Image: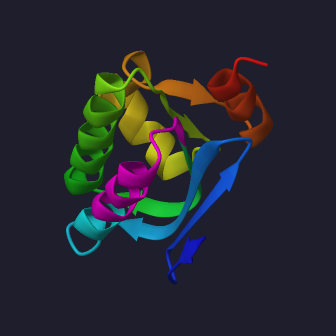
Amino acid sequence: MMSTDQMVLDRKEGVLIVSVAGRLDITNSEEFENAVLKELEEKKTSVIVRFQDVSYMSSSGVRALLSMYHELRKHGKLLIITELSTAVKKIITVTELDRVFAVADTLENALQQATGK
């Protein structure tokens, strides 16, 4: 498990779970993206990103998500976003990325989608 002040990476049922907190913007979106992609180098798995504690997400954060999404699709894996804060939900809805990413209300629902259970 990797942990910083704003990000925790963990695995559950063979799925990478990334919990993000604070702001996801130009100052840390590259670190966010690189940490997830590095983790995927070792083991290609679906990824769940939890956004309940994110107060702000800029276009840099959206770009990082899209980059991860495209990398995962190459390997037939899913990117599922869950527990969206109000700020993140607004961005995902306005940009219609809820039509691109799988969205789940809860971590449990996201795990069900990721594992097919």
Q: Is residue 37 visible?
A: yes
- Measured from the top left, where is residue 78 in percent x and y? 48, 27
| Residue sitting at x 60%, y 51% | 17
Q: Identify the residue at horizontal 23%, vertical 64% (top origin).
A: 30
Q: Quadrant of the N terminus?
A: bottom right
- Work out whether 24 lies above or below 115: below
Q: Nearer the viewer, residue 56 or 51?
A: 51
Residue at position x 31%, y 42% in the image: 68
Quarter of image, res 11: bottom right
Q: Which stretch did the figure color magenta?
A: 33-47
Q: Quadrant of residue 62?
A: top left
> How far across and down, in percent of the image, does residue 73 sit?
33, 24
Name above or below for residue 8 compared with residue 81. below
Asked whether, in this view, residue 7 is left or right of residue 76, the answer is: right
Task: Count up the numbered dots.
Answer: 0
Residue nearer the viewer, 107 or 41: 41
Q: Position of residue 102 (x, y in %)?
A: 51, 23
Residue 36 colored in magenta in the image: yes
What residue is drawn where x is 79% and y is 19%?
117
